[in-house]
């Protein structure tokens, strides 16, 4: 499966952005889909995951970000509200066969398919 992100940009603190991740290829299989981010000089951080059973969020984005998917469009979204400078990073979508873990974010090392990333910058 191929993944293509879009929707990044620059916003001020408190602003909003919506990221999209379009999937193509073998989209009929069952996947755990997720959003990850990597700030300059830092490790990858899980943001949110979604599968047919539900969603999971990192504590740092809970109640501010919403992950969703439109199966008819083969597209996953990340609605980001109340953005903070600490949210600035390259955001990646990822997919792995099977289901997400539910209680906690499926680790970044378990994902096989990755998009190219979209940059989000939040200015203070």
Image: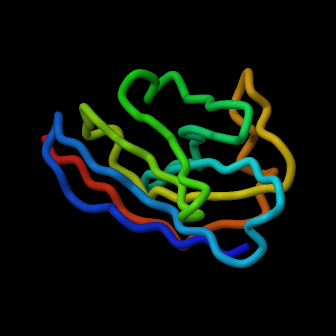
Viewer-proximal residue among 12 and 22 = 22
Q: Is residue 67 above or below residue 69?
A: above
Residue 21, image x, y percentages: 51, 62
- Residue at 51%, 43% (x, y): give it: 68
Q: Is residue 111 above or below residue 115?
A: above
Residue 30, image x, y percentages: 82, 53
Considering the image in quadrants, where does the N terminus appear?
Answer: bottom right
* Picture quadrant where residue 22 is located: bottom right
The answer to whether residue 122 is left or right of residue 59 is left
Q: Is residue 117 above or below residue 124?
A: below
Viewer-proximal residue among 51 and 70 = 70
- Residue at 54%, 53% (x, y): give it: 70
- Residue at 40%, 67% (x, y): give it: 6
Q: How is the image coloured?
A: rainbow
Q: Please, which residue is most extreme toward the right here?
A: 98
The answer to whether residue 97 is left or right of residue 12 is right
């Amino acid at each position: 499966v191929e993944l293509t992100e879009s929707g990044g940009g620059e916003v001020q603190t408190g602003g909003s952005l919506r990221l999209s991740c379009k999937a193509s290829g073998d989209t009929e299989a069952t996947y755990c889909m997720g959003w990850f981010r990597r700030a300059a000089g830092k490790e990858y951080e899980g943001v949110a995951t979604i599968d047919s059973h539900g969603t999971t969020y990192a504590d740092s984005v809970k109640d501010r970000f919403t992950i969703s998917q439109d199966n008819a469009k083969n597209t996953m979204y990340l609605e980001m509200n109340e953005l903070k400078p600490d949210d600035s990073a390259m955001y990646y979508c990822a997919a792995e066969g099977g289901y997400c873990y539910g209680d906690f974010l499926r680790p970044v090392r378990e994902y096989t398919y990755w998009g190219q990333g979209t940059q989000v910058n939040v200015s203070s």
